[in-house]
Image: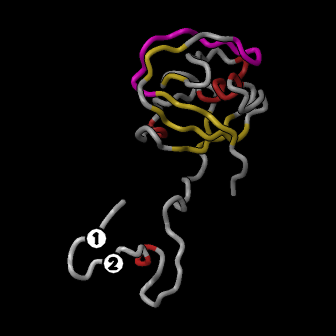
Amino acid sequence: MAECDGEDGDNSGASQSEDAGGNTKKPLLGQLPLPNPYLIDCTTTLDEFLYAGDPGSIYVSYCSDGCRDSGAVIHGNGIYDHTSAICKSAIHAGVLDNRGGFVTVKVGFAHKTFSEMVSRKVGSVKAEWSRKTYTLSKTLSWH
């Protein structure tokens, strides 16, 4: 619980949701737009300059088609290391199929180990420690 200190402190919280005229306003938190999607190919990794954000950063990308059979390497299973090809990882994770499409990339923290696993005809390779990771999710709509 927070408390206001001082003679004219207002602990009602109204100042956070009302403008000067007493009208209710929506908070801006969570309403910032995402940048336009990045068009990426089968070899693009988190190390590309496009994904320079800190852990917690979110990017929408558009993967080209045919990445399942590319020679790109991935490390992990659900959590992927920064050197893993994003589009091939998205197929491995079940977020995309081999036709490509929109994928949401969330940058994560360092991680100790990455298991190997074949999923959806895509194999991942075991790896040790990575300074940066990412997870993937379906992009439900983009406007």
Residue 127, magenta (yes or no): yes
**Which residue is under mark 1?**
4
Callout 1: SS: loop
**Which residue is under mark 2?**
10
Q: Is residue 59 above or below residue 122?
A: below
Q: Position of residue 12 (x, y in %)?
A: 40, 75
Q: Are marks 1 and 2 in contact (CB under 8 Å)?
A: yes
- Residue bounds of the magenta highlight: 118-132
Q: Position of residue 40 (x, y in %)?
A: 61, 36
Callout 2: SS: loop
117 or 90: nearer the eye? Answer: 117
Q: Label 2 sits on what residue type? A: Asp
Q: Quadrant of the N terminus?
A: bottom left
Side of 65 relative to 125 (left or right): right
Side of 25 relative to 12 (left or right): right
Q: Quadrant of the C terminus?
A: bottom right
Distance from Cα at disc 1 to Cα at disc 2: 6 Å
Residue 2, magenta (yes or no): no
Looking at marks 1 and 2 on the same chain, the residue that comes earlier in the sequence is marked by 1
72 or 122: nearer the eye? Answer: 122
91 or 2: nearer the eye? Answer: 2
Crowd band around label 2 with a 10 angstrom C-alpha radius: few (<14), some (14–19), many (20+): few
8 or 56: nearer the eye? Answer: 8
| Quarter of image, res 3 | bottom left
Q: Label 1 sits on what residue type? A: Cys
